[in-house]
Image: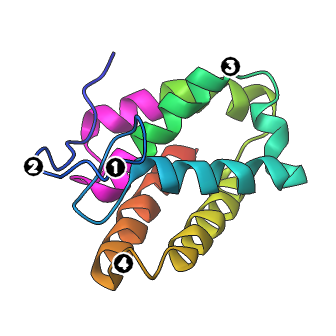
Amino acid sequence: MAKHAQIDRDAIDLGEGEHKVFSKEVSGKKVVDLLFHKLLEDAELSQYWSNVAPETLSHQQDVMMEIAFGAGLLPEDITYLKEVHASAMSYKGLTDRHFDMYLKHFETVLKELGSIIPSDKSKSAVANMKACKVIFKK
């Protein structure tokens, strides 16, 4: 498996259960949980995860959060994410338009967590996540 974006290894555990902590302010569990529910509630996007095992989807979202709150999109992440999304792109019509929808949900989650995620972290995470759109370009 590809090496993924590095997270802040000096971060403290905020005590919210088993999860990754992406910085002193950002709990991966909280971000992933909120985002996961939004994606499943989105009728257009949820179809892409109907046959994906929950642990697989959770891992994939962890990778995306590592990119967002870590070092950004690395070459090995591009390779991994293209592999992960290849089937949905080829057989289910997943496109960059769907990524834009995903990104809107991500931005909404960050706004909802605005009281605990500093503005600079949110801006950086959105910029890092936007870079992932390259995966969905043909």
Q: Nearer the viewer, residue 51 or 2?
A: 51
- Residue at coordinates 61% horizontally, 73% vertically from top-left? 108
Q: Secondary structure at mark 2?
A: loop
Q: Which residue is mark 1?
A: 67
- Residue 100 point in image, percent of width and height: 64, 63
Q: Which segment did they paint magenta?
A: 65-81
Q: Earlier in the sequence, mark 3 or mark 1?
A: 3
Q: Alpha-carbon distance for marks 3 and 2?
A: 31 Å
Q: Quadrant of residue 35?
A: bottom right
State how far apart marks 3 and 1 are (Cα).
21 Å
Residue where numbered disc 3 is placed: 53
Mark 2 nearby-residue class (10 Å; few <14, some 14–19, many ≥20): few
Does 91 sit above or below residue 129? above
Which residue is farthest front? 15
Mark 1 falls on what kind of element?
helix
Disc 4 marks which residue? Answer: 123
Q: Tags 1 and 2 in contact by the CB under 8 Å rule?
A: no
Using residue 96 as the reference point, say whether residue 5 is left or right of it: left
Image quadrant in which you'd find residue 55: top right
Q: Earlier in the sequence, mark 3 or mark 2?
A: 2
Between discs 4 and 1, the one toward the N terminus: 1
**Image quadrant occupied by the N terminus:** top left
Query: For the point 68% across and 19% down, which residue is it?
Result: 53
Amino acid type assigned to the residue bearing label 4 in the image: Lys
Q: Which label's residue is closer to the chain start, 4 or 3? A: 3
**Residue 72 highlighted magenta (yes or no):** yes
Marks 2 and 4 close (CB-CB < 8 Å): no
